[in-house]
Amino acid sequence: AAMIESMDQGIGQVLDRLTALGLDENTVVVFTSDNGGHGNSTSNEPLRGSKGMLYEGGVRVPLAVRWSGVARPGSRNDTPNITMDLFPTLLELAGAPLPLSLTIDGVSLVPLLRGAPSLTRQALFWHFPVYLEAYAGQTGPWRATPSSAMRQGDWKLIESFEDGRLELYNLREHPSEKRDLAATHPAKARELREALARWRASVGAPVPTTRNPAYEQRSGAGREPLPASGRSPRGRAGSAGAPRPAAARGTNDPPVSSHDH
């Protein structure tokens, strides 16, 4: 609560300063976060998971925009979007062209800010091909293991690279992701898995399959490492909704290598 109050005061100081300088009418202010709340510091209930996880508690974050004279104060739009959308959005707001030399992962949110009900994008994707160490006090060595996820409409799929396991959720009916529908909706799970694989291929997002020789598995901790085959992963962000962590060291080194190459 104290941190929220402090943040509120800080944002107020920024907005007050813009007004004092006469810049508030032609300055767009964006408030967001790069990940969900830290698991040991807060609760993301009713969402499952936390920072560093592909569950909604790790990737669903606030986004508030003030655009004086255009975005209606107090309005709300529930269209899913992702952090990479801010780059083309800010370019459009500034009247700058998209760089032709780059492949842009996001889309501009300006239509939503102007009152459009939705975007034409079909899906959102996340790629997290690394191991992330557990929070202090958490059972097991890993908070997250190599995986990808996608959301299409109300449906969300998470694919684990360790064993190929699929998790399927309907976020409109079960936003807490406590009811896995992969077994009861196999056709939908297969459809999204194929779409996720096509997206990974289109952006060059490799799946980790090579053992990390530096890994020393603790007795009875976690799953077995991946089989020794394929190539080392490359930390490409693609449309990932969470930052890439540095690899853990020592006995907590991940069982597959996670260096760039």
Image: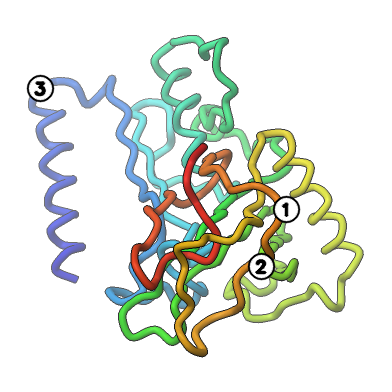
Circle 1: element type: loop
Q: Earlier in the sequence, mark 1 or mark 3?
A: 3
Using a 10 Å C-alpha cutoff, classify the residue at mark 3 as few (fewer than 14 neighbours), some (14 to 19) or many (20 or more).
few
Name the residue rendered at 49%, 48% in the picture. Answer: 76
Q: State whether residue 259 appears in this view.
A: yes
The answer for how far apart the CA atoms under marks 1 and 3 are is: 42 Å
Marks 2/1 in contact by CB < 8 Å: the verdict is no
Residue where numbered disc 2 is placed = 162
The number of discs equals: 3
Name the residue rendered at 26%, 23% in the picture. Answer: 25
Extreme-bottom residue of the structure:
220
| Mark in front: 1 vs 3 | 1
Marks 1/3 in contact by CB < 8 Å: the verdict is no
**Picture coordinates of residue 254, whole percent (x, y):** 48, 65
Residue where numbered disc 1 is placed = 153
Q: Which mark is residue 21?
A: 3
**Picture coordinates of residue 36, whole percent (x, y):** 41, 61
**Picture coordinates of residue 236, whole percent (x, y):** 54, 40
Q: Earlier in the sequence, mark 2 or mark 1?
A: 1
Name the residue rendered at 72%, 77% in the picture. Answer: 180
